[in-house]
Amino acid sequence: MAVLSDADRKIAARKFIREVFVGLNQTAQLDTIEVKLLIDGIDGGLEAAAGSINQAIDPLVRSKATTSQKALATAFVALKRAGVI
């Protein structure tokens, strides 16, 4: 899984603010810079954990699923845990 570019992280931070704080009407004690740092940290953490996440997938499925499918499944699980979907 590739790390996002700084420009993509900025876009993600803006979308996060728009979708979560505005769209889902959630409050936060975070300013724009802190949201960007949150996105930076999670992106870096996902990169560091990619191998562990991949190893947690059943070997039969791991060999068949694409990197994109694994990333989307990771996102889906995270959204489900957050109660968004």
Image (tube, rainbow, N blue to C red):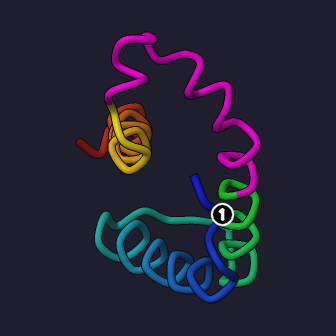
Quadrant hosting residue 40 = bottom right
Residue located 33% across and 43% down the image: 69
Q: How many marks overall?
A: 1
Residue 77 x, y percent position in the rendering: 38, 33
Residue at image mark 1? 3
Relative image position of residue 36 (x, y in whole percent): 69, 76
- Horizontal side of 56 relative to 76 (left or right) equals right
Q: Nearer the viewer, residue 80 or 47?
A: 47
4 is higher (above) or lower (below) than 72: below
Residue 61 location (% of width, % of height): 34, 19
Toward the viewer: 30 or 77? 77
The residue range painted magenta reads 44-64
Neighbour tally class for label 1: few under 14, some 14-19, many 20 plus, Cα within 10 Å: some
Residue at the far bottom in the pictured view: 7
Q: Quadrant of the C terminus?
A: top left
Residue shown at the point (74%, 83%) measured from the top left = 33
Residue name at image x 66 percent, y 72 percent: 35
Quarter of the rendering containing residue 21 = bottom left
Residue at the far left: name it.
85
Q: Residue 75: percent from the left, percent from the top?
A: 40, 45
Tell whether position 6 is magenta: no
Determine if the magenta segment contains residue 63: yes
Per the picture, the main secondary structure of the magenta-coloured stretch is helix
Q: Is residue 2 left or right of residue 61?
A: right
Amino acid at the residue labelled 1: Val
The correct choice, above or below, for 44 with respect to 17 in the image is above
Q: Is residue 19 above or below residue 68?
A: below
Q: What residue is drawn where x is 55% and y is 27%?
A: 54
| Viewer-side residue, 47 vs 80 | 47
Displayed quadrant of residue 23: bottom left
- SS at mark 1? loop
